[in-house]
Image (tube, rainbow, N blue to C red):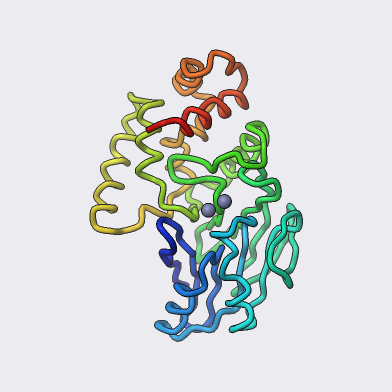
Amino acid sequence: MDLIPLPAFADNYIWMLHDGQRALVVDPGDAEPVFGALQRLGLQLQTILVTHHHADHVGGVDKLRNATGAHVFGPARERIPEPLEKLNDGAQIEAMGLAFEVIDVPGHTAGHIAYYCADLEGRPLLFCGDTLFSGGCGRLFEGTPAQMLHSLDRLAALPGDTRVCCTHEYTLSNLKFARAVEPRNADLVHYTAQCEEKRAQHQPTLPSSIALELRINPFLRTRQPEVADAARAFDAKAHDDASVLGALREWKNQFK
Ligand SMILES: [Zn+2]
Ligand SMILES: [Zn+2]
């Protein structure tokens, strides 16, 4: 099984899994890169997974479904182009012969879901949309810091070797902020250098892994004293884990 990120728009990736014959894509905001890959690799699109309702994640769904007959899965609590199979937390689905579990991750949007496969050729895999990014997390458009904290906690509890497939190439800008939060984090310095080299060669920095994110992502590290102190230096009212996360998110929104 091959896992490839198809670049779309300015910084989206449409993740594709294929076995040389059949393909699955996640959050196809644009149909064209998917059609291109299907043709180039001689694949039949079988499944579309959608994480949330934003246009850059669903814009290509109708075209792809109409052209290929692919089965569409998406969150039950959001408006996604129909027909689709609507999923709630804990749902188990099968696609491409793989078992995926649905995890509710509200925060970026109210009904955002993630897809977790415990075993893709011996390693777990996560499609997390705009909830978790490498070095960052999604903006809180429809949810509270407490909801996002709970969602990120659920993802952080997945096995460390889980490959994390995020939808945006935001890594370098996230890491710039992360270094402002934790200037003494040596893993962060090392990882930044690796990512800068990849981007200089136009390579994706993704997928990441849960183990790596736990070491470098301030939004998964709100309970580290250095991170909480830095958040409080930005907003003195940040008193508990959720308000620390809220302060970090607000700080990141203003960060240049
Ligand atoms: Zn989004
Ligand atoms: Zn997005």
Residue 173, given in percent of the width and then of the height, sits at 37, 41
**Quadrant where the C terminus is found in the figure:** top left
Quarter of image, res 157? top right
Horizontal side of 45 relative to 206 (left or right) equals right
Residue 104, given in percent of the width and then of the height, sits at 69, 49
Quarter of image, res 174? top left
188 relative to 247, above or below: below
Horizontal side of 12 relative to 236 (left or right) equals left
**104 vs 118, nearest the viewer:** 104
Residue 78, given in percent of the width and then of the height, sits at 72, 55
Q: Residue at x 43, y 35 (%)?
A: 215
Q: Residue at x 59, y 77 (%)?
A: 63
**89 vs 58, nearest the viewer:** 58
**235 vs 181, nearest the viewer:** 235
19 relative to 57, above or below: below
Quarter of image, res 51? bottom right
**231 vs 92, nearest the viewer:** 231
Q: Residue at x 60, y 71 (%)?
A: 61
119 relative to 183, above or below: below
Residue 200, given in percent of the width and then of the height, sits at 24, 53
